[in-house]
Image: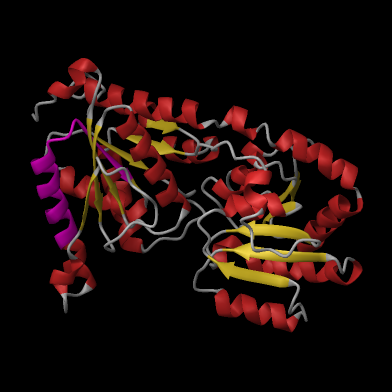
Amino acid sequence: MMQREQTIDGTLRVLCVITAMGCGGAERRLAWLVNRLAEKGHRIALRVLHGDDSFFEIDPAIGVRFFAEEHLHGANAVAKFLRRPEWLRGQIVAERPDVVLSFIDVANVVTLWAGRPLECPIVVAERTHPPSHTVPVWYAILRRFLYPGASRVVVQTEETARWARRWLDPDRVVTIPNPVVASLSAGDHLSQCPLPQGRHWLVAAGRLSEEKGFDKLIEAFAKIAPHHPDWHLVVLGEGPERALLEHHVREHGLQGRVEIPGVVRNPEDYFHASDIFVLTSRYEGFPNSLCEAMACGLPVVSFDCPVGPGEIIVDGEDGLLVPAGDVSVLAAALRRLIDNPDEAARMAGRAARVVERFGEQAVAARWEELLLSTAMGWGDPGGGRA
């Protein structure tokens, strides 16, 4: 068994693994977590299976290494997949961590595979709602085979926890929501936002991909745009459906009314300059952008999709939930807030309280407690892998 002297004084050696460190929500949350753990004095290492850079700033004290995919030119997908567990196993042996923490589906499978011969506790974090998130058959099979070997499986919502507990040891399934970072005041942001002032803005944010449902959002906006000429829509993000979404904008005659500026490092700048946040996802894991918009004091309208919005929004109090995928009801909900600014203002005031429920200090403490208890409990009855 690997020695873990660091746990004696309450500090840990943690090796974190993630698929990539692009601009996504899971990547942003892992960057936040490793930085917070490093600030607390824990020795953190980060290993990334794809790419060669991080979109988010990482504490210089954290050792970051990327899988050297450039050495595999000409290798097929199977060969590349087989090499990653081998590389990661070597990293675990070299780092001798007290606990390994993996974020995101494929990274979880690679990490559990790599760790099978090693006596080291592994925590894996699901960042979507798997029943709604289609994955390749090979991954689904490996997940069923390998996840029971995890010391803990962390999910973001109680609905996902119920799914996991149906086939995993219920005591090993832990729910930890994403943190909501308290935003700066509006005055600190408005001067930085490039949105033209003097207009009303609906804002949405996320990867420009099918699951985010921005096609539905454009369709809903097309229903209300003729009646509210001073309202515009901005969608923050980048992804494979940009061309399709731009086609929808042209198809509905919304040129000049819809902006898609791409990835922005500080979406809060846009939230503070906007009037209503809209979420139209077909499914979610835990909608970070929704919480961030609420923390900025925006009234929100969201599809009640699986999973997350229904556990965040109190319908009619701090936002509006509408049936998932129903464009007509979505348009009606947006008109309701546009036509009733006093109601929108009341919801905005209540929305900011989301920070009280999902504050970063409380969430960071839950992660730290989980990692420490997992490391200390390794080898105890019920504390290790099956």
User: x%, y% of residue 138?
Assistant: 30, 61
Q: Is residue 262 left or right of residue 15?
A: right
- Regarding residue 348, the answer to whether it shows in the image is yes
| Residue at left offset 53%, top offset 60% | 264
Query: Dividing the image into 4 quarters, which one contains the C terminus?
Result: top left
Q: Nearer the viewer, residue 78 or 343?
A: 343
> Residue 30, located in which quarter of the rendered image?
top left
Relative to 10, is 236 on the left or the right? right
- Magenta span covers which residues? 83-102
Q: Is residue 287 visible?
A: no
Residue 88: % across, % down? 16, 51
* Position of residue 154 in the picture relative to residue 12 (left or right): right
- Seen from this angle, which residue lies furthest front? 191
Q: Is residue 375 above or below residue 131?
A: above
Q: Is residue 89 magenta?
A: yes
Taken as a whole, is the magenta stretch helix, strand or loop? helix
Magenta span includes 217: no
- Image: 122 above or below 106: above
Residue 154 x/y as whole percent? 40, 37
Q: Is residue 54 left or right of residue 341?
A: left
